[in-house]
Image (tube, rainbow, N blue to C red):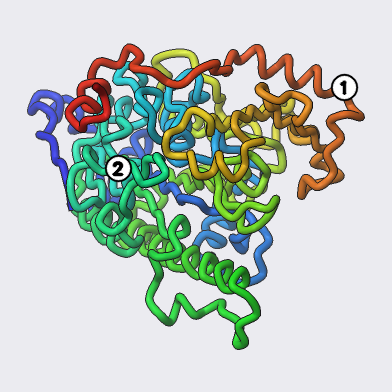
Amino acid sequence: MHVRVRGLRSVATLLLAAPLLGGLGCSQSAPDRPNVLLITLDTTRADRLGCYGNPRDTSPNLDALAADGVRFDRAIATAALTPVAHASIFTGLLPPNHGVRVIYAASGYRLPDTVPTLATVLEKEGWRTGAFLSAFPVSEFYGFDRGFETFDNGLGHAGEGVLEENETGAWSFDGTDNQRRSDETADAALAWMKKSDDPFYAWVHFWDPHDPLLVPPPDVANRYQPEVALSRTVGMRALYDAEIHWVDRQIGRLVDELRTTGVLDNTIIVVVSDHGEGLGDHDHWYHRILYQEQIRVPLLMRFPQGARGKVVPEVVRTTDIFPTVLAALGLEPEGALDGSPLHGLMAGVSEEPRLAYAEALIKYDLNAKDLLAKRPQDDVLHCLTDGKWKLIHRPLRPSESELYNLERDARETNNVFAAQPGIVEELLSRIEDLDPFVDGPFGEGDDAEAIERLRALGYVD
């Protein structure tokens, strides 16, 4: 696997910070400098976890974490696309503001070096930082390595050179040596955590539910399969549940390590999915589009002195994670954010409904040509919801836009776009305020470093 380890911070920095430092192996960590463990679950639908209503016992460790912390019932991602959604988690910004809009194009796929992330902030403040990933779409190719002293991307080689053009003209990556199973990722994270003497920030990314070929051991893979094969769809959904269960076991290993070493109660834990999966709903098996099964994500948080067994029913956004963690650490963001801290909602304080935005720029993503051929109506999508109403706006075909009353129609089966022009106008005006619209392909742009990377790979003439 490709692992990059940067040099230690200067001796002077370590000496100045020494009175405050504490780590995984020491239960005397200063309470104002807790560890931070961020776990991102790739392609994991909220409703496939036990704590979100799945009766199949897929997630006992996550269910226990929810019971010992805070579960957000209606967390909304900014996209059903891995790099775009992760960039919002890391920065507290919407895609138009952090700049990651597609998996691959001439530009618009890489997080600019000028955008602060949780890793860059915490590294600067003295946290030991490590990332342990499971697949290419969260690699350094997308600019996600900044701020990490250790960046273990889980690939067979560096992220550059992974994308290739197939016979249809779509750009994609070969999964054989550009992803790894969650137990291998957990092994790497645990080995690093055990060596930590400073307060640490660890980002652990699990990929398994994204890929039906990345199967768990046979006893787990067969755990949810019916005794009699009913259909391929039933079998694939059963495998999806099994992959979630295997990831859940790895999360249990991480939490057990924190507990065993005495630092669980000095660690902030955040578990969130980047996006969900269609699983056949709305006539779509995979992701990228913006129905609830794809952008409603599980979000769990546990703070050392936080609430236990709390459920927050209001709409929240994955952009709220970054400011919430910073506020818990007593740190200020370096610039304006689109998200805001969640501590008021966790404390039961009533707030104005938060508006959650999501987008899908499928027309401009060179990785999405196959999907665009199958679903041309989903070429460009912009979505906004306040929890009750949800607008999916199609700027290139406005009359085909969709509006749903989620309180009455949670599965989005009754499009009331034509019957509610006032609601449509209000939500559309709020989308326009965000200025997210794109009127042409992503060109070379102004990111000189990204252009040179692409030129070296042969993507730029």
> Which quadrant would residue 108 be assigned to in this image?
top left
Out of 268 and 240, give the one closest to the viewer: 240
Numbered circle sitting on residue 164: 2
As drawn, the residue found furthest toward the bottom would be 227
Question: In screen coordinates, is 48 left or right of 460?
Answer: right
In-image side of 170 versus 153 (left or right): right
Q: Position of residue 9 (x, y in %)?
A: 13, 29
Dot 2 or dot 1, earlier in sequence: 2
Which residue reaches farthest right?
Answer: 419
Residue 215, position as x, y percentages in the image: 40, 69
Does residue 302 appear left or right of residue 232 in this picture?
Answer: left
The answer for how far apart the CA atoms under marks 2 and 1 are is: 44 Å
Q: Quadrant of the C terminus?
A: top left
- Whether residue 174 is visible: yes
Q: Position of residue 348 (x, y in %)?
A: 70, 36
Asked if residue 21 shows in the view, the reply is no
Q: Residue at x 88, y 29 (%)?
A: 418
Judged from the image, the secondary structure of the residue bearing numbered disc 2 is strand
Camera-nearest residue between 328 and 182? 182
Mark 2 nearby-residue class (10 Å; few <14, some 14–19, many ≥20): some
Q: Amino acid at mark 2?
A: Glu
Please, what secondary structure does the residue beneath circle 1 have? helix
For residue 146, above or below residue 205: above
